Image: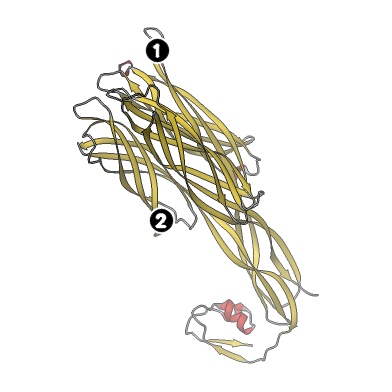
């Protein structure tokens, strides 16, 4: 009759390559009215938005926009001024074996911003990190059943192949306003920074409904005595439908990138009118569709009678799982101000950027360590002229997930509050949002082809064998050509008697 082989095609996700690159970009803006007065930058921030990632043969061409903003003081003034600047990011990352039809994921973040005054301009130096991951979907054929001969011993393994099948994105425009108290005497919005938290990505009619919130912090200049500026914190609701085929929606997850955020102060109209702070933010909401293929694959086979078998094997590379975890954790510590900085009286605003140093797995969890780079805007004791200082605070977080090599770890500062402990040190309390994505990639040997050879050659008799530490009933049965069920329980140093 001969061997009857049934096959199944399994689509697998293969990691073609991933790379992390550092980029340093420069932007500058003209300082209006700058003359002989000293210009002192006090606070600076930047946002990196990836506008396009072009996957080409053996490389990824990245185009982005870096938006910078700074708050500064001019001469002996006690008021704060602000300006903005933009520049382009153009970067090429080499990924060998990459092809245009593959799937490419790009993640970028600003690590550090330095602002200084030069010849009538404020010059920004922005250090960025860009991460690129390229994957490809490849069909693999496995044997799911084999029959036609007596005396076949077979071993099967259930394969699960998790893969990113598609992606889709939409631009979301968020707009809202908040009333400001009259006692604040708000003048203008100086600076904005924002974090986005996604709470839900659920299937909806026509795609995936992404819900969450964007937390905005705006530094507003004030005319109140002894208060040159104040931070106003308020949320913007995110509710965006991203189009996606219905059959892909159940396995989808979402990410959001900030393209721009801008606030303005609208003065009160009339005696009873309220001063309002109006904010507009533009986000790109991206949805990735993840699906799972399953198959029962033949991983080993041998014959106990009839003809011997010729077995050809192959190795499959696949992503067997994609684990995600999201946690929010509070950290606190002490910031020391610089030796030449003026003593701290009242803190006005704080900007903090996280930098991950290392992470390690302990007892099924991952401990992440790093530092928070904080820039603090404050009023020194006994004066109304704003000053600033920069410092670092170490942090440690625990994520309830054992991260694999190549895992993606994103940390953002949801909020940061600083208060003066003494004139030369500050206490910072920060709430950090951590999102981890850890694909589990495996290489599994399966049987690709089976053919019949000559008759099984063996002498009848009784065999006494002592299994090794790595032996089980399958390996012993295959070695002596007897059914695995006949071998029974195995143990190192325990003799087994087989009838051949």
Please state the horizontal and vertical placement of residue 401, each as a whole percent of the image.
44, 54
Helix, strand, or loop for circle 2? strand
Furthest residue toward top: 270
Quarter of the rendering occupied by the C terminus: bottom right
* For residue 356, side relative to residue 429 (left or right): right
Residue 364, by quadrant, is bottom left
Give neighbour class at mark 2: few <14, some 14-19, many 20+ (Cα, 10 Å).
some
Quarter of the rendering occupied by the N terminus: bottom right
Vertical position of residue 321 compared to residue 209: above or below: below
Badge 1 vs badge 2, beta-carbon distance below 8 Å: no
Foreground residue among 98 and 5: 98
Foreground residue among 5 and 436: 436
User: Which residue occupies 19% across, 36% down?
Assistant: 423
Please state the horizontal and vertical placement of residue 59, each as a whole percent of the image.
60, 51
The residue singled out by tag 1 in the image is 268
Give neighbour class at mark 1: few <14, some 14-19, many 20+ (Cα, 10 Å).
some
The residue singled out by tag 2 in the image is 365
User: Which residue occupies 62% across, 63% down?
Assistant: 316
Point out the frontmost of discs 1 and 2: 1
Q: Earlier in the sequence, mark 1 or mark 2?
A: 1
Residue at mark 1 to residue at mark 2: CA–CA distance: 53 Å
Vertical position of residue 42 compared to residue 134: above or below: above
Residue 67's label in the rendered image is none
């Amino acid at each position: 009759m001969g061997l009857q082989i049934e096959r199944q095609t399994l689509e697998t996700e293969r990691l073609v390559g991933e790379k992390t690159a550092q980029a340093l970009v420069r932007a500058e803006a003209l300082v209006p009215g700058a003359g002989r007065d000293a210009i002192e930058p006090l606070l600076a921030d930047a946002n990196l938005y990836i506008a396009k990632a072009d996957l080409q043969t053996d490389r990824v061409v990245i185009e982005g926009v870096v938006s910078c903003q700074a708050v500064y003081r001019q001469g002996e003034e006690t008021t704060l001024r602000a300006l903005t600047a933009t520049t382009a990011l153009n970067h090429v990352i080499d990924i060998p074996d990459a092809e245009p039809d593959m799937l490419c994921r790009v993640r970028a973040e600003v690590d550090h911003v330095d602002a200084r005054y030069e010849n009538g301009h404020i010059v920004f130096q922005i250090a960025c990190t860009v991460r690129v991951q390229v994957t490809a979907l490849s069909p693999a054929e496995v044997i799911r059943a084999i029959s036609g001969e007596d005396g076949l011993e077979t071993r099967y393994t259930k394969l699960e192949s998790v893969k990113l099948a598609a992606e889709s994105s939409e631009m979301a425009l968020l707009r809202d306003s908040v009333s400001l108290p009259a006692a604040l005497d708000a003048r203008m919005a100086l600076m904005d920074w924002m974090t986005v938290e996604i709470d839900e990505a659920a299937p909806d009619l026509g795609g995936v409904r992404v819900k969450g919130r964007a937390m905005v912090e705006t530094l507003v200049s004030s005319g109140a005595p002894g208060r040159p500026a104040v931070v106003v914190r308020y949320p913007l609701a995110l509710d965006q439908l991203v189009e996606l085929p219905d059959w892909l929606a159940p396995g989808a997850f979402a990410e959001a990138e900030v393209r721009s955020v801008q606030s303005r102060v609208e003065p009160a109209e009339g005696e009873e009118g309220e001063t309002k702070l109006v904010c507009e933010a533009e986000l790109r909401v991206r949805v990735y569709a993840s699906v799972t293929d399953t198959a029962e694959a033949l991983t080993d086979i041998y014959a106990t009678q009839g003809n011997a078998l010729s077995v050809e094997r192959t190795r499959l590379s696949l992503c067997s799982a994609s684990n995600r975890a999201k946690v929010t954790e509070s950290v606190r510590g002490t910031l020391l101000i610089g030796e030449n900085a003026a003593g701290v009286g009242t803190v006005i605003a704080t900007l903090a950027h996280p930098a991950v140093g290392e992470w390690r797995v302990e007892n099924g969890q991952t401990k992440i360590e790093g530092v928070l780079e904080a820039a603090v805007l404050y009023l020194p004791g006994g004066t109304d002229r704003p000053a600033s200082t920069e410092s670092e605070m170490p942090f440690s977080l625990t994520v309830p997930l054992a991260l694999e090599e190549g895992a993606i770890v994103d940390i953002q500062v949801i909020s940061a509050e600083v208060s003066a402990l003494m004139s030369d040190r500050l206490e910072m309390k920060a709430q950090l949002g951590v999102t981890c994505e850890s694909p589990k990639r495996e290489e599994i040997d399966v049987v690709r082809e089976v053919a019949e050879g000559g008759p099984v050659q063996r002498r009848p008799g009784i065999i006494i064998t002592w299994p090794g530490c790595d032996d089980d009933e399958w390996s012993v049965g295959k070695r002596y050509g007897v059914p695995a069920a006949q071998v029974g329980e195995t143990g190192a140093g325990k003799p087994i008697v087989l009838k051949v």
